[in-house]
Image: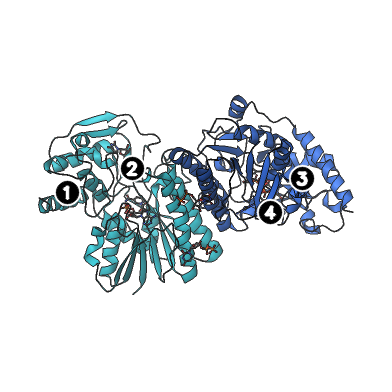
Chain colours: A blue, B cyan
Amino acid sequence: RKRVLITGGAGFVGSHLVDRLMMEGHEVIVVDNFFTGRKRNVEHWIGHENFELIHHDIVNPLFIEVDQIYNLASPASPPHYMHNPVKTIKTNTVGTINMLGLAKRVGARVLIASTSEVYGDPEVHPQTESYWGHVNPIGPRACYDESKRVSETLAYSYGKQENVAVRVARILTRTVLVCIATMAGWCPTSSSRHSPAKTLLSVIGIMAPKRPGTPTGASEKKRKNNIYGSGKQTRSFQYVSDLVDGLIKLQNNNYSLPVNLGNPDEHTIEEFASIIHTMVGGKSHIIHKDAMEDDPQRRKPDITRANNILGWQPLVPLQQGIKKTVEYFRRELMRSK
Amino acid sequence: RKRVLITGGAGFVGSHLVDRLMMEGHEVIVVDNFFTGRKRNVEHWIGHENFELIHHDIVNPLFIEVDQIYNLASPASPPHYMHNPVKTIKTNTVGTINMLGLAKRVGARVLIASTSEVYGDPEVHPQTESYWGHVNPIGPRACYDESKRVSETLAYSYGKQENVAVRVARILTRTVLVCIATMAGWCPTSSSRHSPAKTLLSVIGIMAPKRPGTPTGASEKKRKNNIYGSGKQTRSFQYVSDLVDGLIKLQNNNYSLPVNLGNPDEHTIEEFASIIHTMVGGKSHIIHKDAMEDDPQRRKPDITRANNILGWQPLVPLQQGIKKTVEYFRRELMRSK
Ligand SMILES: NC(=O)c1ccc[n+]([C@@H]2O[C@H](COP(=O)([O-])OP(=O)(O)OC[C@H]3O[C@@H](n4cnc5c(N)ncnc54)[C@H](O)[C@@H]3O)[C@@H](O)[C@H]2O)c1
Ligand SMILES: NC(=O)c1ccc[n+]([C@@H]2O[C@H](COP(=O)([O-])OP(=O)(O)OC[C@H]3O[C@@H](n4cnc5c(N)ncnc54)[C@H](O)[C@@H]3O)[C@@H](O)[C@H]2O)c1
Ligand SMILES: O=c1ccn([C@@H]2O[C@H](COP(=O)(O)OP(=O)(O)O)[C@@H](O)[C@H]2O)c(=O)[nH]1
Ligand SMILES: O=c1ccn([C@@H]2O[C@H](COP(=O)(O)OP(=O)(O)O)[C@@H](O)[C@H]2O)c(=O)[nH]1
Ligand SMILES: O=c1ccn([C@@H]2O[C@H](COP(=O)(O)OP(=O)(O)O)[C@@H](O)[C@H]2O)c(=O)[nH]1
Ligand SMILES: O=c1ccn([C@@H]2O[C@H](COP(=O)(O)OP(=O)(O)O)[C@@H](O)[C@H]2O)c(=O)[nH]1
């Protein structure tokens, strides 16, 4: 039984990780500033003797005693990380320094939640972990991409210099649940405070019309489904349970170089929109808009390393992930009526 | 007349910039932690009513009132920045954040000393400012390359979000004077505290043998001239007076995107060693060693932008720069006998 700190534990991935680790009987401490996360995501654990929720911003030092750290705190989608670029960078630089400093002091092991964005708009497919990436250091996504890159550099610098045990997960953008959740404009286990209009899920605003009063992102205007650029750009999606498996396996393995955690199953945004469309039903007006600046055109992770080292691969296929999620939202929507 | 803060002002580039700005009649405040810089480099100004030297580390907040900031504080050569990678990253992230926070508070303009290292081991020649670079985020140079990249990202984030006026100079590695200075293992206007063995200038240990007691870098062992790899890798060198011109022109211009400041005149390390060899005389044993990890193979800046926007180009040719420097060192060596 371990004392585990999860920064960003009130967010989408973090809260699922909390569930798993609590079920396994660990002591779990969540640190979150609630920028995109919500207390609701972990409320079912509040009061449990193994659980603690600390309202804290990792840009400030934190003094607690733990065995393991999952450093997930960071805005994660373009509208969120572009909302306050300076804060995004502070979180991934100063915040990461604080968590590595904490780990150094208490001898904890740290897993850094990095991202496939470190590959930028890749010129090599699929992307293995040894690919150096193709990132615009001063483009609109740079506040996220560059600060995540340097968070990896920091991890290995503390690793080499201070003997901190570090793990780096390069998580492949983005998980199915986030997508559909955001699409619905409201989602219990994901960030929902800011307008999701610009995220993938606004591609499909189909569920929203069925609901009466939706707090964000489901106004008549948002219901239009914009595809930025040709729609031929690809992404890969994994279901959140697969990702949580991978994170736990990586944290508890001895391997310290970066490991891609994602689904190599590549789909175009157009395909993706149409899969969900078919599944969810309803009418959507797809509108083609100008491509977003520096929008990566392809994403296809090579997960050989995760497979060899961790014996990991995604198990939930895309269609099933979407189906589960849609059902989940149907239930949530019923409940909220 | 302006109040100008120069962080890293006791270093090589900084101290030459101090000289120029003091001569122009400005108030100059130097902030330095003396990691590689030396008080000696600016001692001729100590006591002058327009000059102030503050012993301070930019990783900590600084509260002063100024009109312009040249943020040069950072270890600058591989042996220095690899000496303490964590500190290198802190300086370029937390330190840069502090200087941008200061600029935001007092409404000052900031010039960030970036580097051609943001291009990494470039796959495109020559490198224009729009090239995204080819950098290994977890390699041995990453603590410098990646933290300099994110310092640019920070600059533009504060620029856009907080209206801080920012300038970014991508300085082309490395100036002739640094080189020869380091080669001599001792140098008045450059960093000399740490072993220069691994820097370019150890390629030519020729001057050292003439001196009796040399503090660092000139032991019998160091006098051997190692060329790492084939010696066919190229670099470009500019004389420090040209660089100082460029920095001042950029700071006072309205252009805020990154500007390369360097000499497009490309030489292989071998050629460079032989030019200096011929000029300085003496015997040197060139020994070929294994290539250094991630050693950039070519460097050739495109300076069209600096030329068009600032009307700038390097004026001092390589041979003359080396000659000036050699003379300078001959004098210094005589004096110290
Ligand atoms: N979901 C994905 O597809 C994906 C892909 C690649 C990487 N990641 C990374 O995984 C991590 C989790 O992502 P997510 O999808 O769960 O996002 P999320 O927005 O749902 O969760 C992030 C959490 O971090 C918190 N947070 C943000 N800044 C903070 C700060 N300064 N101090 C404390 N807490 C802070 C937020 O409030 C939120 O609860 C992030 O680091 C993200 O970059 C996610
Ligand atoms: N000289 C070059 O060829 C070259 C090339 C590219 C970029 N640059 C950049 O130009 C700047 C100056 O380089 P230089 O050649 O004069 O190097 P230098 O080492 O001579 O000077 C750097 C100065 O910064 C000081 N410093 C370092 N960390 C500090 C900290 N945390 N707080 C306060 N002061 C600190 C050092 O003591 C030193 O005086 C650096 O930012 C460097 O990265 C230089
Ligand atoms: O238990 C701890 C130990 C350190 N830190 C922070 O981590 C940072 C980096 O730690 P490190 O040991 O590298 O820095 P140092 O304290 O040596 O400056 C410090 O600035 C602290 O603010 C923290 O938040 N909790
Ligand atoms: O309403 C939208 C939102 C996103 N996209 C595209 O969908 C892809 C995924 O976007 P997301 O914001 O989820 O994040 P990313 O994967 O780029 O980090 C990108 O190519 C976007 O341009 C789109 O076409 N319409
Ligand atoms: O005159 C100043 C103003 C700010 N800062 C530092 O600059 C950082 C970034 O400033 P910003 O305004 O972005 O941060 P905030 O104070 O809003 O957290 C702060 O952490 C301060 O430590 C400083 O050193 N001098
Ligand atoms: O004793 C030395 C020192 C450097 N170099 C090479 O000279 C070039 C310039 O090295 P420097 O350390 O000056 O810095 P860089 O330009 O790589 O930042 C690199 O290709 C080094 O491998 C060399 O061959 N022998």
Q: Dot 2: what SS?
A: helix
- Of mark 1 and mark 2, the one earlier in the sequence is 2
> Which element carries disc 1, helix, strand or loop?
helix
Q: Residues within 10 Å of mark 2 (few under 14, many from 20)?
A: some
Residue A309: numbered disc: none
Q: Is residue B204 left or right of residue A275?
A: left
Tell me the residue that label 1 is attached to.
Answer: B326
Q: Which residue is disc 3 drawn over?
A: A180
Mark 3 in CB contact with mark 4 (< 8 angstroms): no
Residue drawn at (45%, 51%) of the image? B90
Residue type (three-letter) at the residue carrying disc 4? Thr
**Mark-to-mark CA distance, 3 and 2:** 50 Å
**Compared to A84, does A255 lie above or below?**
above
**Rendered location of residue B32, percent (x, y):** 34, 59
Q: Badge 2 is on which residue? A: B79
Q: Position of residue B2 (x, y in %)?
A: 36, 73
**Secondary structure of the residue carrying numbered label 4:** loop
Mark 4 and mark 2: span between their CA atoms?
Answer: 41 Å
Residue at left offset 52%, top offset 35%? A131
Question: What residue sits right under mark 4 in the picture?
Answer: A36
Q: Chain of mark 2?
A: B
- Mark 1 CB lies closer than 8 A to ligand 6: no
Q: Does residue B323 appear to the left or right of B162 in the view shown?
A: left
